[in-house]
Amino acid sequence: MNVERDDPCRKVRERCPIVRTNGISEYAETVDVLSDAVAAMRIGRPHSSRTELRAPWGIRFPAQRGAGFHVVLQGACWLIPTRGDPIRLVVGDVAFIPRELGHAIADSLDTPLRDQNDANIPTIGDPTTVLLCGAYLLDQSRMHPLLAELPEVVHLPARVGRHPTLRGAIDLLGRELDADPLPGAPGVLPPLLEVLLLYILRAWHEDRSTHDDTGWAVALRDPDLAPALQAMHHDPASPWTVRDLAELAGLSRSAFAQRFTATLGIPPQTYLTWWRMTLAARLLREADLPLRTVATRVGYVSEYAFAKAFKREFGTAPGRYRSAAG
């Protein structure tokens, strides 16, 4: 009798079939690690503004819980990070500060810096610099490694033909903030800001993947590792083993484990546990679900096993974590 072997990966393959085109693996159903990483850290609505500045001006931004960006629409300026050398920004340049350690921007390195809300910043005369600025509220205490590997300042210089979707998002956001609020602006701005953030991250990872040999920029475009990462994100509750993930990658168990660890710096099961606990923490903060349901959604059949794993990761029991977050 021909008995079909039990295949724990079949369900995911049937739901999200992998299509290999020119050596690149893609899921027919969209599973996006980058979007997941941002969503898992989000703790509030983003905000933005269009700012006209008249020389001399210098603004100091305090450290915050989140990330921020500046786009130069007119003129030029200097971005002065907490650590590292100042960066000259010209029209079309994007500067993203992923960890908001505090920074400053100024028309000149010689201009004294004033606090962000200082009323003495010049407001009379034609603007010499116009900036599009924004901020995202993100949980920095548990930053996804995809964002943790970013430099303290992501500088994306304006280049003709580079990252057209990013430029398109900047143009749309700039128009929404250009004058008096347009009809529907409160509903349009938050999703535009979310799109801009993803385009900024995508642009940086696209640039890095052509230069680096390791890291998330490489893994997300790796035709073998990407399917395994997508599967973990698509169905974290599945009882994945290294062998299951290796099969999705089209590699032997040992080759997959070695390649995953060498590229991302952590073993696949370690990342899977980290991701499950990150999702569990978000569910505990945002959803009024029984602990048993939370445990099931992140791959634990036993509430006790889930509580033990959660406490090992966060240093506190799930119930206490939820109470403190509330």
Image (cartoon, grey):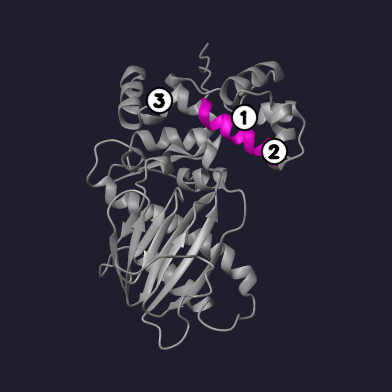
212 or 131, nearer to the observer: 131
**Secondary element type, mark 1:** loop
Give residue 160's quadrant in the image: bottom left
Rendered view: 251 above or below 101: above
Q: How many numbered markers are drawn?
A: 3
Where is residue 285 drawn, in percent x and y? 69, 39
Above or below for 170 versus 224? below
Percent across and percent down for residue 190 are 58, 63
Foreground mark, 1 or 3? 1
Residue 186 appears in view = yes
Give the residues in magenta: 273-285
Q: Nearer the viewer, mark 1 or mark 2?
A: 2
Question: For residue 199, what is the image quadrant?
Answer: bottom left
Graded by Cα atoms within 10 Å as few (under 14), some (14 to 19) or many (20 or more), the crowding at tag 1 reads many
| Residue 75 falls left or right of residue 306 | left
Residue depicted at x 51% and y 47%: 38
Is residue 152 shown in magenta?
A: no
Which comes before the other along the chain, label 1 or label 3?
3
Q: Which residue is mark 1?
A: 298
Q: Residue under circle 3?
A: 247
Residue 159 is labelled as none
What predominant SS class does the magenta segment belong to?
A: helix
Q: Which mark is residue 325?
A: 2
Q: From mark 1 to mark 2, how far is it between C-alphas?
A: 19 Å
Kind of residue sitting beneath label 3? Glu
Q: Is residue 77 left or right of residue 233?
A: left
- Residue 271 lies, with reference to residue 254, above or below; the image says below
Q: Secondary structure at mark 3?
A: helix
Callout 3: few (<14), some (14-19), or many (20+) C-alpha neighbours within 10 Å?
some
